[in-house]
Amino acid sequence: MGIVIDVSHASDKTVLDVLEISKAPIIASHSCVREINPIPRNISDELIKKIAQKGGIVMVNFYAGFLDKGWEEKSHKVYQELEPIREELKKKYGDDKNGYYKEIFEIWKKKAPPAPKIDKLIEHIEHIIKIAGIDAVGIGSDFEGAGTFMDNLKDVSELPNLTCELLKRGYSKKDMEKILGGNFLRVLKEVERNRFAF
């Protein structure tokens, strides 16, 4: 139908069902590699390969908790320590969710463990390339949805830092174009080409 199907929040079974039914490539728009950080929200090697076989891509999320198992474990402890403060702030702000989130985020930033380095992001990218090929990977930052990112990749203005790191590792211009958006554009074209292919 010309709609890109995104499985980033889906269960493994749902991803398999979608792959079986869809005539066009699918994406995981903001997920990481489960082999590196074994949380359900990340994508298994088996599913990465199956998504790639169908022409789809896994777009790596920049959120620290999806990238780094150690960071996720440390942050969970901090989150538990903040429980009494969170309850107080909920009472203080009531229905004012913006006020609550603004204040708790400021407190969180002071107590949160150090964010992972950009190397951790590239580890996920390179794992996907290793098992499924350069055409199977993209970037899906989640800047508008997640909270803690890498120190030198906190927002869109710092995306050139990722480009520089990929250059240092010897990626060709063609490969970098694929990683940084070309693969996603290819999927969009393929989905459009398959419209109404019943």
Image: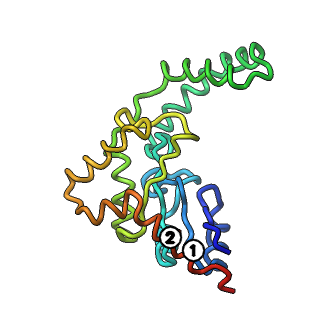
Residue 146, quarter of the rendered image: top right
Q: Is residue 40 left or right of residue 45?
A: right
Query: What residue is at 74 percent from the left and 20 percent from the top?
Result: 90
Q: Real-space Cα distance between discs 1 and 2?
A: 6 Å
Quarter of the image where the C terminus is located: bottom right
Residue 159 position within the rendered picture, expressed as x and y whole percent measured from the top left = 36, 44
Q: How many marks?
A: 2
102 up-or-down from 74: above or below: above
Judge left or right: residue 30 versus residue 113.
right
Q: Which kind of residue does numbered mark 1 sit on? A: Val
**Residue that appears at 64% across and 77% down:** 22
State how the image is colored. rainbow
Residue 66 spot, x, y in % from top left: 50, 46
Which SS class for mark 1? helix
Name the residue nearer the viewer: 50 or 34.
50
According to the picture, the residue beneath numbered tag 1 turns out to be 191
- For label 2, the residue is 187
Check residue 172 in the rendering and tell me which mark sits there, or answer none: none
Q: Disc 1, disc 2: CB below 8 Å? A: yes
Q: Is residue 161 above or below residue 24?
A: above
Residue lying farthest to the bottom in this orientation: 198
Residue at 34% across, 51% down: 122
Could you tell me residue 6's position as x and y percent? 61, 62
Dot 2 amino acid type: Val
Badge 2: few (under 14), some or many (20 or more) residues near its Cα, within 10 Å? Answer: many
Residue drawn 53% across the image and 34% down it: 147
Q: Is residue 106 above or below residue 190?
A: above
